[in-house]
Image: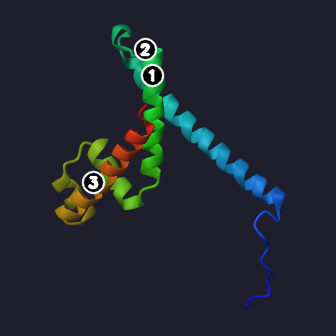
Amino acid sequence: MSGRRREAPGAEPRALLTHIAKGLVVDHWRRRALEDAYAEVLAQLPAPEAPSPEARALILETLHAIDAALRSLPARTREIFLLSQFDGMGYAEIAQDRRVSLSTVKRHMQTALTACLIAYQADAP
């Protein structure tokens, strides 16, 4: 046994509050970055094509839910999903680039898409 004494959870309230505060700050800046990126995309749209304020709010809620779902995925699954969805790479191309089998890419994509669908459905009114 080590010489360290285990403290009961909550025995260090200042440390706990500091940890929670840091997490909230990170979440705030992550949300802010996502919202800023969405605002940049909206700024490029012609005015008649821009969504209404209500639609924007719903879209942002969905984006936040999907972002949280993607952050919860293993790094390799997230990477494969992003290569497919945002870099436009095909499954075979990803498999070759990442030196994995095509079935591995498909498995990771299924996991990521399922997580996004669950996040979307959980966020739906």
Q: CA distance from mark 2 to mark 3?
A: 32 Å
Q: Which mark is residue 118?
A: none
Q: CA distance from mark 3 to mark 1?
A: 27 Å
Sort mark 1 into few (<14), some (14-19) or many (20+) by Cα contacts within 10 Å: some
N-terminal-most mark, 3 or 1: 1
Q: Cβ–Cβ below 8 Å for labels 2 and 1? A: yes
Q: Position of residue 112 (x, y in %)?
A: 33, 52
The N terminus appears in which quarter of the rendering?
bottom right
Q: Is residue 64 left or right of residue 89?
A: right
| Dot 1 amino acid type | Arg
Q: Which residue is denoted by mark 1 in the rendering? A: 56
Q: CA distance from mark 2 to mark 1?
A: 6 Å
Q: Which residue is denoted by mark 2 in the rendering? A: 52
Image quadrant in which you'd find residue 38: top left
Q: Which mark is residue 109?
A: 3
Secondary structure of the residue carrying tag 3 is helix
92 versus 57 height, above or below: below
The C terminus appears in which quarter of the rendering?
top left
Image quadrant in which you'd find residue 15: bottom right
Sort mark 3 into few (<14), some (14-19) or many (20+) by Cα contacts within 10 Å: many
N-terminal-most mark, 2 or 3: 2
95 versus 69 height, above or below: below
- The residue under the point 33% across, 13% down is 49
Sort mark 2 into few (<14), some (14-19) or many (20+) by Cα contacts within 10 Å: few
